[in-house]
Amino acid sequence: MDSSLVLSPKLNPCFNPLSPLYPFTPCSYSAPLRLSSCYSSRFYSMVTVKAAKKNSQSVRSEFDDRINGDFSPDSDSRFLDRQKALEAAMNDINSSFGKGSVTRLGSAGGALVETFPSGVLTLDLALGGGLPKGRVVEIYGPESSGKTTLALHAIAEVQKAGGNAMLVDAEHAFDPAYSKALGVDVENLIVCQPDNGEMALEIADRMCRSGAVDLICVDSVSALTPRAEIEGEIGMQQMGLQARLMSQALRKMSGNASKAGCTLIFLNQIRYKIGVYYGNPEVTSGGIALKFFASVRLEIRSAGKIKSSKGDEDIGLRARVRVQKSKVSRPYKQAEFEIMFGEGVSKLGCILDCAEIMEVGVKKGSWYSYEDQRLEQGREKALQHLKENLFKTRLKRE
């Protein structure tokens, strides 16, 4: 074409639907259109741009129709071919690697992450529902901050729902009496007191793969001593043994826990880095693999002691939990609750705190009120009021 440009579905190969230039050229012309050579390139560019915009809008509307279910795939052979190829590939993968290796998320019913209550109502509110099933959870903090108490409450909640729980007591400090006071069914609790770290993690992995355990708690990561360190002499420096042990174990256990729906809770201690003058010198033991594999990381610290009514002795502590990491909810939320010595987390205290957060109960000054009714003045009296009314309600039901 020396002096003219012909745009026609019959004469121009760009109008062929099989041509790679087909989506970018207009296809609604029925007669040849001849242009002078001086305006041919400019006009052709304008027509091409307008046609591309029009075609992109039609493709977008066609895609929306497919999503909304208004489009019939019988009219598009390419769409049918792609779907057939996709189904063939999925069937081939499932036949090679097992059923369920590749599946659609909607048909698998896994759109939402299932959770179970942690036993602390304010913490469940901060986590967006509770602890996730089939995930790795790390709870760390300083000594006597409530790590074991929080884990025992989670174990009790799993047992109340009819599930099985296991405690890997690497510290060899399990107290059955205190666990029973927290609501743990110690008769049916699976307890393991391993000799070394390899033994502890191997037992936990086998129980996880069985599919019969809903929760496994390891207390604690710092007490998982590698076998080489136990067999060696005291004072020998063997760098990175525990970090390599945790990294290797988590690579196996995280996938097995997800398939079995078993939650893994690792309690961890805090250490201090040497020579740090700026920033936070605190670091958790066991390397950094647990930080990456954990879906939820909870930092628990003491926010103060709770005195008795006379003020002469400590009867509990106020714990503050910060969600440092969460892949299943919004992170960096905080929850506070009371841990009473010998009794565990105060349920009524959590109810009172949640009522204030959700604005169900109103606190004006030191007075607690519900709707138009005043309860008591001061937190201790308000808790006592709730306790007495709960006791009266139980008596009426009986």
Image (spheres, rainbow, N blue to C red):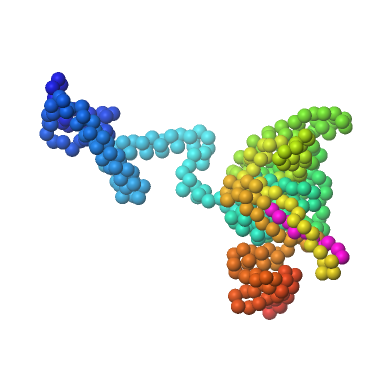
In percent of width and height, residue 212 lies at: 65, 49
Residue at the far bottom in the pictured view: 396
Compared across the picture, whether 191 is left or right of 85 comes to right
In percent of width and height, residue 252 lies at: 65, 37
Compared across the picture, whether 326 is left or right of 25 comes to right
State yes or no: residue 172 in magenta. no
Compared across the picture, whether 111 is left or right of 203 comes to left
Q: How many marks?
A: 0
In the rendered image, the vertical position of residue 262 relative to residue 377, given as above or below? above
Nearest the camera: 249 or 6? Answer: 6
Q: Quadrant of the N terminus?
A: top left
Region rendered in magenta: 312-321
* Residue 37, quarter of the rendered image: top left
In percent of width and height, residue 41 lies at: 20, 27
Task: Give me the residue at 60% from left, 75% from top.
Answer: 371
In percent of width and height, residue 324 lies at: 65, 47
In the rendered image, the vertical position of residue 348 relative to residue 277, given as above or below? below
In the rendered image, the vertical position of residue 246 relative to residue 158, given as above or below? above
Q: In which quarter of the image is the C terminus?
A: bottom right
Task: Give me the residue at 28% from left, 28% from top.
Answer: 20
* Residue 370, quarter of the rendered image: bottom right
* Residue 119 is at least partly visible in this image: no
Majority secondary structure in the magenta region:
strand
State yes or no: residue 315 in magenta. yes
Nearest the camera: 345 or 321? Answer: 321
Residue at the far front in the pictured view: 278
Task: Give me the residue at 66% from left, 40% from top.
Answer: 291
Task: Give me the residue at 62% from left, 70% from top.
Answer: 361
Compared across the picture, whether 296 is left or right of 44 comes to right
* Residue 44, quarter of the rendered image: top left
* Residue 336 is at least partly visible in this image: yes
